[in-house]
Amino acid sequence: DTVTTNDYYLYKDTYGKPWLVRMPDLEIVSVSISHTQTFLFVGISMSSSLDIGVDVEKIRDYKEELMESLYTEKERLLFGSYSQDAVAMLITKAWCIKESVVKALGCGFRIHPKRIDVSEVTQLSAGGVGSVFIDEKKIQVSLCHFEIQGDHVFVGCLLQNATEIQESLGFSL
């Protein structure tokens, strides 16, 4: 799929990650898109060394079976330490962090969500630099996140050296 404008081409690679190609120099720009019925977010990183991932989700309760299949034991222990009122937002934020990381990596959920541990960065109040772990491999990320209208969570993730991380995890794009 390709969309063109005067100076840019928007396309998806074989893994479904969108990219902008700036003409005529063929500079590739990282793009990420997420939406709910209410919101649409588009993230664009004009830096060739930083890939971006964004996610927005409506805050909702999760069934225990789903929690066990998507979240690490460390994450579930963290969720259990919060009040019932705060836990739905925290779980949704953790999911958004996972999704924004795999979008920045360019692989989507070809990496099973349970292989990704975000317990360290889930507690950041508004974002910052921190570590996520994929198969216990430490990956530094820059995050911003916020609650929207009390019922949605947005997360943006910037990731440096995505290609090296992909290769260290055993896949490349």
Image: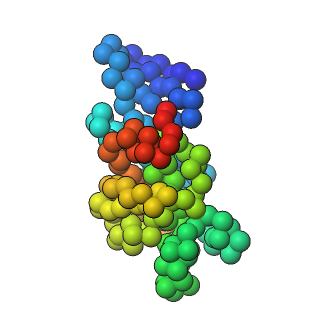
Give the residue at x 47% y 19%.
4
Give the residue at x 49% y 85%.
81
Colour logic: rainbow
Q: Residue 70's spot in the image, x, y percent?
A: 61, 64
Residue 80 or 54: which is nearer the viewer? 80
Q: Image check: 52 left or right of 129? A: right
* 106 lies above or below 25: below
Q: Residue 159's spot in the image, x, y percent?
A: 35, 47
* 62 lies above or below 156: below
Give the residue at x 35% y 18%.
26
* 98 lies above or below 43: below
Q: Residue 137's spot in the image, x, y percent?
A: 42, 57
Q: Image check: 168 left or right of 66? A: left
Q: Is residue 42 visible in this depiction of the protein? A: no
Q: Image check: 139 left or right of 152? A: left
Q: Residue 2's spot in the image, x, y percent?
A: 53, 21
Residue 2 or 142: which is nearer the viewer? 142
Residue 71 or 10: which is nearer the viewer? 71
Residue 102 or 57: which is nearer the viewer? 102
Q: Is residue 10 visible in this depiction of the protein? A: yes
Give the residue at x 52% y 47%.
34
* 172 lies above or below 157: above
Question: From this viewpoint, which residue is outermost toward the top?
Answer: 24
